[in-house]
Amino acid sequence: MERRISSRPTFPASRSSLPTLTQRFPPIVAFTLQEAKDALELLAVHSRQLQAWQKDTIGDAERAEIVRLQAIVPEIRPLIQRVIALATELDRRAKGGTASPRKRWRH
């Protein structure tokens, strides 16, 4: 008896029977959330350290680097906050088992 392997994937009858990403990988969501929270805290520590260094007697090159780094802190903070918001939403969905309603396509 020869067995044929189909190149077409088979799908369950209902998408609701498939486990969601957060149901299959809850530790990944929790890890991401914790890492993002830690990164936000570390960014605040680095920002304070840059301010302290700026008050010290430093050379022009060091001062220029501190100014450059201080300029990107306000750009990085909202990115980390967005990651926290997304991970929090994924965590909430994983624990509640609900998904938010899909948005309608705009054509």
Image (cartoon, rainbow, N blue to C red):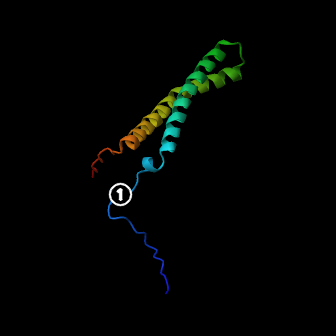
Give the x, y percent position of residue 56: 68, 13
Name the one closer to the observer, 105 or 37.
37
Query: Dividing the picture into quarters, in which one does residue 62 lie?
Result: top right
Which residue: 27% across, 49% down?
104
Which residue: 48% across, 42% down?
29
Give the x, y percent position of residue 5: 48, 77
Which residue: 55% across, 29% down?
72
- Asked which secondary structure carries label 1, the reply is helix
Above/below status of 70 relative to 101: above
Give the x, y percent position of residue 25: 48, 48
Q: Amino acid at mark 1?
A: Ser
Give the x, y percent position of residue 54: 64, 16
Above/below status of 65 relative to 34: above
The residue identified by callout 1 is 17
Above/below status of 47 relative to 16: above
Name the one closer to the observer, 32 or 17.
17
Q: How many marks?
A: 1
Q: Is residue 102 left or right of residue 89?
A: left
Name the one closer to the observer, 70 or 15.
15
Above/below status of 12 relative to 98: below
Which residue: 65% across, 25% down?
65
